[in-house]
């Protein structure tokens, strides 16, 4: 049986997370018992939600336990199986964590699903046709509920969630304007994903300046917004929302590292009769099948070709994750494990 | 024809509104033309929304024009009529403004409605069985959508909106906790309206302290909140919201006079999957009949006996209004005009 390299959470961040919070260990993979499945991970997904789990704070999910393998989505291949549902060679997706192999217990098997790699590349099941894609779908379809002709904005527009959000909204006849960090990301969003415009928030020093740029990019105002970031970007967008606008709150990465970042203009919720709603996609499993079908259709049609930032080898996971938190990734952040 | 005393908006407030912003004038009431109706106002309603209209800022409604009669709800009696819908002696409610008489033009007649004073006192049609009551009903039934057994909180709990909100929520089987300014108001809310508890926000110097008191008053957390105030109170409540909590935003009086008051913990919208939604009751006229019926039923059953602060005479309107903005009223603020 193979040796399994694993990243454990060694300590909780005091403010910014850093490499010292993680520890790499080796463990021997024991022989399979009846009902177990051995999966070799091909890719590990790195996502902003993991930063929240590193804190020992009340949240929608339990904190990541100290001394245990970091949580994370993975895709891979079944190597050995003593369970009737899986066979060697099956490609599977599930929450395998920051490690090279998973042994699925019988009661975990149903949380993994087989995927078809004949039309969609395996890694996409961690991004555009996985949790990030479904996150975009849910926020758009269940909270923003856009009508054709409306204007929809999204922050972190070049990321795994943002890119799917934009392509989904375009496919529903919306004007879509992204907000991203840097001209490379903005060019990708407009030229490769077909957004109508993209603003580089790094060009603006405060929310009022960014909101003035949004006025030009969104001449008819903003009807729906998908928030991945919070802080300055959310303030700027709120200043441009139309009456009865909807804001789906998916991420507040701006406040993960320390002090909460306030919302500067909450009175706009009243003035413009806004709906501001947070959600966690894992609480809406009933929507996953229809969302995954819509996303895979867009991929197969060539409309959604997500960017990926791929770090190489399990050793690289913490550095890639810390870079993601600073916006250094470009598109879906993965770690390739084989 | 009678002389009509009228309060005009003379100037816009620089920060706090004050008596100098208003001017009292006399005008002669001209003889009625065909299709017109003369109404003598018995009561004028004073409401926080009027403060927003005094600013020349983008809002959901046009600003109050300078040099014109201040906007406001009134109840009164038809004195003369040259319109087939109304007859002398009819009791009516409508937006008569800060003055002693209205002459309804033919195209305004449909915006006034006749009311039945045999079971509900005339003044209540400006409060519990009027716009403030419907405001409470809409926020509760259309945004908070409470289930029996849930905990609902409301700020400005002893006011016209808050008192109706609490009684409506109690009638739906909720635990109801008010937040009000001062022990007199809290005693009224608990002893006369039947709230389960009430906190005097003036006893707490910051949101964290108030939230600790809320923890005791709401041992199972808060599922729904009706916000009339904003600022510290909203921050404190958000710290106690349960997952999937709903916040109906009706007022942000804390920020009317100057700088916006930020929301301190917007990341809780995500963490607790909150829905925070603003609304304006006048945009939901389709709900008024069912809401008014429910409210008048509670009044007739003796469950909703609203407090009123009644100023005497049209001269008293500005001072009473400025007091309302500082929370000096106790219950629905009215001006008695006859």
Image (spheres, coloured by chain):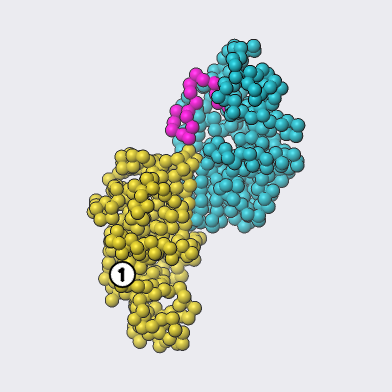
Chain colours: A yellow, B cyan
Residue at numbered disc 1: A119
Quadrant in which residue A158 is drawn: bottom left
Is residue B318 visible in the rendered structure shown here?
no
Is residue B122 found left or right of A7 in the rendered image?
Answer: right
Whether residue B275 appears in this view of the structure is yes
Q: Residue at x 53, y 38 (%)?
A: B283
* Towards the viewer: B107 or A32: B107
- Left/right placement of residue A185 relative to residue A36 reads left
Query: Which chain hosts label 1?
Result: A
SS assignment for the magenta stretch, majority = loop
Counting from the top left corner in percent of width and height, residue A171 is at: 35, 54
Task: Specify whether residue B74 is painted magenta.
Answer: no
Q: In this view, does A136 lie to the left or right of B91?
A: left
Mark count: 1
Q: Specify start and end residues of the magenta stretch as a single range.
A: B56-72
Going 35% across and 87% down the picture, which residue do you hit? A1
Which residue shows up at 40% across the image and 64% down it? A292
On screen, A168 above or below B63? Answer: below
Q: Is residue B84 left or right of residue B251?
A: right
Q: Is residue B134 above or below residue A252?
A: above
Residue A265, given in percent of the width and then of the height, sits at 44, 41
> Was residue B59 drawn as part of the magenta stretch in this picture?
yes
Relative image position of residue B144 (x, y in whole percent) = 58, 49
Mark 1 crowd level (few <14, some 14–19, many ≥20, 10 Å Cα): few
């Amino acid at each position: 049986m193979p040796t399994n390299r694993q990243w454990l959470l060694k300590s909780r961040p005091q403010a910014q997370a850093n490499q010292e919070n993680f520890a790499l260990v080796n463990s021997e993979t024991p022989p399979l018992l009846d009902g177990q499945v051995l999966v070799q991970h091909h890719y590990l997904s790195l996502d902003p939600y993991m930063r929240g789990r590193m804190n020992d704070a009340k949240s929608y999910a339990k904190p990541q336990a100290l001394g245990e393998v970091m949580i994370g989505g993975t895709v891979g291949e079944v190597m050995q199986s003593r369970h009737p549902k899986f066979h060697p060679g099956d490609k599977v997706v599930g929450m395998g964590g920051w490690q090279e192999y998973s042994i699925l217990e019988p009661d975990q098997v149903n949380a993994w699903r087989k995927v078809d790699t004949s039309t969609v590349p395996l890694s996409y099941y961690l991004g555009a046709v996985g949790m990030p894609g479904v996150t975009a779908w849910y926020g758009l379809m269940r909270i923003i509920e856009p009508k054709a002709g409306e204007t929809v904005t999204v922050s972190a527009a070049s990321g795994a969630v943002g890119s799917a959000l934009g392509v989904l909204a375009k496919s529903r006849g919306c004007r879509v304007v992204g907000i991203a960090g840097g001209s490379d990301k903005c060019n990708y969003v407009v030229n490769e994903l077909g957004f109508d415009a993209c603003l580089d928030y790094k060009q603006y020093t405060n929310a009022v300046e960014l909101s003035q740029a949004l006025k030009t990019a969104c001449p008819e105002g903003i009807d729906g917004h998908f928030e991945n970031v919070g802080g300055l970007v959310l303030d700027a967008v709120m200043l441009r929302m139309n009456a009865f606008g909807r804001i789906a709150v998916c991420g507040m990465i701006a406040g993960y590292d320390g002090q909460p970042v306030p919302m500067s203009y909450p009175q706009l919720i009243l003035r413009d009769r806004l709906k501001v709603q947070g959600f966690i996609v894992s609480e809406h499993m009933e929507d996953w099948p229809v969302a995954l079908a819509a996303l895979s259709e867009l991929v197969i049609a060539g409309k959604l070709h997500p960017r990926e930032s791929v770090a190489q080898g399990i050793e690289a996971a913490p550095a890639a994750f810390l870079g993601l938190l600073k916006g250094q990734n470009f598109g879906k952040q993965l770690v390739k494990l084989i």
